[in-house]
Amino acid sequence: MERTTVPGATCRAAAALAALVAGVALCAGDLLARDFPFGSRTRSVNDLGNQYVPLHAHLWDLLHGRADGGLLVNWQSGYGSSFLPDFGTYLSSPFAPLVALFPRDRIDLAVYAITVLKVASAAAAMAWLLLRLRPGRRWAAALLGASYALCGWTLAADYNPMWLDGLIALPLLCLVGEWALAGRRLVPGVLIVALAWSANFYTAYMATLGAGLVLLVRLSLAAPPRRQALAAAGRAVLTVVLGMGLAAPLLAVVYLGTEHAYPGRLARFHPVPAENLPARLLPATYDYSSPALYVGTTALLLALALPFHRAVPGRVRAAWTALVLLVALSLQWAPTSLAWHAFAVPQGSSYRQSFVLCGLLVIAAWHALSYGPPGLPALGAAGALLTLTVAAASRTNLVHAHTWPVLLLGVAGTLTGLLLLRRSGQRGGPGRRGRLAVLAVLVLLGAQTGESAASAAVASGLRLKHLDDYAPWGERQRLQAAAIARADGWPRYRTDPGREQTVANDPLAVGGQGAAYYSSLTSDVLTRTLTALGGGWTSGGRGVQSLDNPVTDVLFSVGARVHSPPDPHQTRLPEDTAAPTVTRREVPPLVTVRARPDHAAFGSSPYRNQELLLGSRVYAVPRIIVRGDDGTPLPGRRVGSGNALTGPSVSARCPAGTQVYLAAPHFSGTARLAGGTESAVPFHYDQGRALAAMEPLGRAPASGRVRIDLVPDRPGRIPPGAVGCLDTARLSTAAARLKATGATSVTVSDGTVRARLPAGSKGIAVLAAPRIAGWRCAAGDGPARPARQYHGLIAVPLDGTETSLNCTFHPPGLRLGTAVGLASLVALLLLSAATAVRRRRLSTPAPTTPPAPRERVTAAP
């Protein structure tokens, strides 16, 4: 294998130029699209607005000492959730703490700045790698480094900022492979692996597979003796194992966090039509469900020219071309797709590994350019392949009208630049050749920047049409945060940000301690408990919503609840400038005592389930009749089709003055209490994706006859016992009883809850938090044991002698991960010490002994 000695200054210059080009092009694309922060269009699509920005806001609060909870427990979401798995999944990037440098109300700008910085870093890392793989011009390495960082995968997925750590990891891990081949830099290599896997294990896994394939190609081209090849591969494996070991404290916690998470929706892999792959190689295309393989016309033409570039050795051409083709085929085969995604079919796009193929295309392009610009025959063959690609792509619906002008400009710029570059090395004096070379570089960099900026703008616009979007921080969130801050009384009681959410993680974004929580790690026990109590969810059960219900407020010690106008960004209605209102309620403390707990299992009625957990009867659940718009009863109480399409209704009888609730988890549309003054209440159900929450509709009239008018927007059904009539006086009595027998004081600090109990407390103490794995509790002076569960909540047995309660939380996997991490650290230190000793011995000259003086022999006389 050829050894390369590229000066560090050359690598640094190429990396800096690549970062500059990538950052400018990305910002220019957002400027063209008028996206935030350069225009009025929001960037917060899909999970960026729902998950990532709120989680970064929570990190800001943690770093500034303003969060409720710490690294172990997030007390703001889901009535108390394990935070370390979320941290390891979404916030463990070394770039994430930079949010602390921005104002809290500019959190969207902070996340955008981190996104640009990550893309620029990926460009710099790839440019550095290319020069280490083979010497070449630094401007060329910068050009291709930027094309990698601005690949179609980035432009389609830059709303997932944590995935961009994988974009950086791929070239860095390839560098680690180069060090393993050379038998040096074990410690930096291990640290890079640990950093990559800690930053985002999901994309780091894919990047590690990609770097392994690159290492295999490098080994095959070098063709060292078997012993040396095995030694190099062994060093690479050892580096990865030790690096993953150092990252184990986070990896183990995240892994076990997924084991305890709500399973969500099941997905199956369905390969896209074959012609969609060449379509996604072109600029200015977008599709959520197909692999985004765009790397820029320059990189694409160079990669296509590689097999025909005679200046490149045949084995090099064959090896890199074969690797690109094999990885491209692996995208479409279910077993290899499963392997790329850590043997779990993703809930969403099935082509999240596409950035690896983009990186390989760029490496192939580098080998085509570093041996000198391709000649006319190679460019002609590449042009013919590009023509076939365009012809295949034109048969798909992925190519839009704006694709063609961007593609034509890209092709024109690429061919002009490459031909000028080739001429600069053939004709004229040094001055003319220099001018031609500078012009070629400017044309190529300009074409790359313009093409990528245009593709970024197009992707942004099309993404907004396909995905949900959310408004950045504004006046609505400011008013919500101010109302919550005024009402906050944690930990004496919770303040819920309200049912009228702005994003799915409102408690993290605006404060408070609510039920709402959206994460890939939402616990199974939280989703199932709140669903049994009438709660709704989205995202296949992983986006738990707040429940506007006084019984659950009593159960979870919600003493203040915020009510905001509907979000105008979601409803598209004129903005309501009214300030949020706060409803206050006398509630028990976080820790209550149940003298005679009822351990009967939850049933199908959320009203009876609430009563079971409360320990008191507070609802009347009448029989219902569901009629169509012609007045006839509907079979199976199915609405949304036939005569139930436009005007079905639900009839029931409730005690006069009781609060009427409708629990119809499989109904989508609006419901309104006939004769009431309240407006229609929305219900949202989407099979497998969303479940509608129980909703209050108003007060029962004096006659007790209740009719609920429904306006369905899709087929659904109303369950038996859907109507509940809440006696608020009975609820107040039950709440007062729980408060009188509950804890006299409660203190909460991160993963520890301490409570003082009234003397003589018997039965069980119940902590109003989901019993997620990791809780251990001790009553009085007794030993700490795994907490028990009472209908999904934390429970501790009491025998009447204890007056205190102490519960601590340790995330599952933390002890195991820490032990593995320490073992890896010790192994790394021992290996480093052994290597240092061996090198010292080799570098120290062997001591020499001066020759003994010869004895003078005197002849005998």
Image: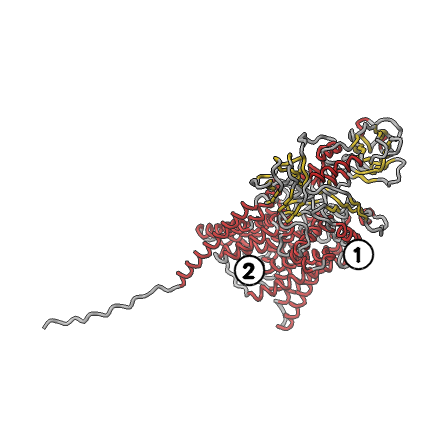
Report helix, strand or loop for mark 2: helix
Category of crowding for the residue at label 2, using alpha-carbon neighbours closer than 10 angstroms: few (below 14), some (14–19), many (at least 20): many
Sequence-first disc among 2 and 1:
1
Check disc 1 and give the amino acid type: Ser
Q: Residue at x 48, y 50 (%)?
A: 234
- Residue 852 at x, y = what percent? 25, 68
Amino acid at the residue labelled 2: Arg
Q: Vertically, is 136 above or below 173?
A: below
Task: Specify whether residue 32 is in view.
Answer: yes
For this rendering, which residue is in front, 537 or 332?
537
Residue sitting nearer the eye, 284 or 120: 120
In the displayed structure image, the side of residue 43 where residue 141 appears, left or right: left
Q: Nearer the viewer, residue 860 or 730?
A: 730
Q: Residue at x 57, y 66 (%)?
A: 9
The residue under label 2 is: 132
Q: Is residue 841 above or below residue 321?
A: below
Disc assigned to residue 40: 1
